[in-house]
Image (cartoon, rainbow, N blue to C red):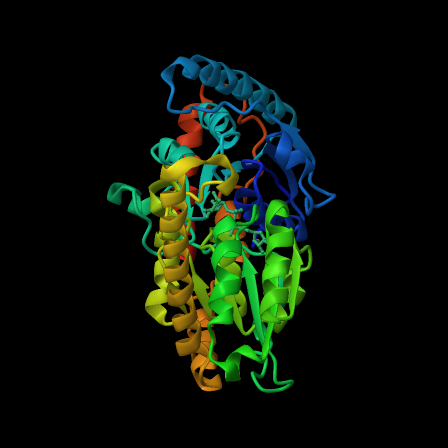
Amino acid sequence: MSSVSCHYVLAAGGTGGHLTPAFALAAELEKRGHHVALITDKRGSEIPGKPDFLPAHVLPAGRFGKNPLRWPTGISAVLQGRGMAKRLYETFQPSAVIGFGGYPALPALLAASSAGIPTIIHEQNAVLGRVNRLLSGRVSAIATAYPDVQRLKGKYAPKTHLVGNPVRPEVLALRDEEFPAFTADGLFRVLVTGGSQGARILSEVVPDALSMLQPALRSRLQITQQCRPEDLERVRDRYAEYAIPAELGTYFEDMQNRLADTHLFIGRAGASTIAELTAVGRPAILIPLPIATDDHQTANAREMVKAGGARSIRQAMATVPNPDDASGTKANAMRHRQADLFQKMAKDISKQIQAMAQHPETLATAAHAAWNCGRPDAAEKLADLVESFGATPIQDVIRVGAKTARGSTRNATASQGAAKDSNS
Ligand SMILES: CC(=O)N[C@H]1[C@@H](OP(=O)(O)OP(=O)(O)OC[C@H]2O[C@@H](n3ccc(=O)[nH]c3=O)[C@H](O)[C@@H]2O)O[C@H](CO)[C@@H](O)[C@@H]1O
């Protein structure tokens, strides 16, 4: 740990998936006496949970969709963002800039590397994301959440460091607590979430899956389920019909309390979800989002499944069409097919729950296997890596000219130091 107070800039897209680890790193760096600023988009500057000490600078989001006609707008936003980032660095004088993926990270890291400022990217998923892939050749170091990251070129291994995916301190605090006794109050508590946005498929299949459990298990169910706002009433009715007690909400702010009581999690395999389940040690049935880029949620789930901490179920359809959108014979046939697929998925999920939860010890063993996959020191390891680039305060690194060459020397030296510390 460095005793020198430095300045760092974190850059992340404005969604929970990118910002949660960025906030955790910001908290760790602040605790170590450093000054931290955030570059994000408009959504990120307004997101709940942003630490008060972290000033947010909003860059225009330069998106590159599939339509090449829109690319000029994206390129112009990146150039504009790069200029804004450069001006920020001139006053803030960061010792390193750390990107967490998402579009605002692209101009922020391009500006840093062209100014000779050391750059680090953090990849939360088990597949390298689009922005991180674009930046991977230029950056000083790559921090990963998983030991194997698909689409990360082997030639970058020397600058790649496994750190894990930092989670919120209040969730991490549960790591040393015992798995809740399955029989203490007779209840079997199941938590269902679909990532930060919720997932419609869970509303469609989970109530049915739970209703199919054998009576001994079903009669002890206590459900907490996150639903999309438009699904809330339908899911409430479904649980009422099955006489299964359920607390529903569109977003639970107190995830630490929910996880503390949970015996089994059912939901998506987003990066932060997996990091939290493994930090706390909760067994899971994971249903990866089938349309996630490069199927990264299936890749995220793999380590936990292999270890015995989770079972993974493939979602039958890529999308769930709105039942109100279609009419006529073809639409009816489609609805029947969809209902059959949902029914099959519900049966699958039910079978897996039955197998996992039939005996308290099976569930506790899976919980322990999940716990073993956790990387609770992710924020510290990432902060160590960051500090290895900023132990010596830089004064004039922004003055272009000699700085690119100087930056690369610093990068190489710091990267080697960090490799010794955190490459495991
Ligand atoms: C739909 C989508 O594109 N998801 C991507 C998005 O994840 P997304 O942000 O949707 O999902 P994650 O699992 O990474 O994070 C969800 C976060 O929301 C929290 N939560 C959830 C529900 C709730 O009621 N309360 C609550 O606090 C969870 O505890 C967790 O911290 O970025 C991740 C990181 O790149 C990717 O892995 C995901 O594939």
Residue 410 in percent (x, y) is at 44, 36
Seen from this angle, which residue lies furthest left?
A: 154
Q: Is residue 20 left or right of residue 315?
A: right
Residue 344 in percent (x, y) is at 36, 61
Asked whether the viewer can see residue 243, the reply is yes
Q: Nearer the viewer, residue 393 or 182?
A: 182
State which quadrant residue 70 falls in.
Answer: top left
Residue at image position (51%, 70%) is 211
Asked whether the viewer can see residue 277, the reply is no
Residue 80 in percent (x, y) is at 54, 16
Seen from this angle, which residue lies furthest right?
A: 52
Q: Is residue 357 left or right of residue 187?
A: left
Q: Is residue 379 left or right of residue 344?
A: right
Residue at image position (53%, 29%) is 104
Residue 369 in percent (x, y) is at 42, 74
Seen in the picture, residue 14 relative to 218 is either above or below; the reply is above
Seen in the picture, residue 188 relative to 94 is either above or below; the reply is below
Residue at image position (45%, 36%) is 327
Seen in the picture, residue 84 relative to 320 is either above or below; the reply is above
Q: Nearer the viewer, residue 284 or 187?
A: 187
**Callout count:** 0
Q: Nearer the viewer, residue 250 or 51?
A: 250
Q: Nearer the viewer, residue 95 or 190?
A: 190
What is the quadrant of the C terminus in the image?
bottom left
State which quadrant residue 36 falls in.
Answer: top right
Seen in the picture, residue 121 relative to 274 is either above or below; the reply is above
Residue at image position (62%, 41%) is 6
What is the quadrant of the N terminus in the image?
bottom right
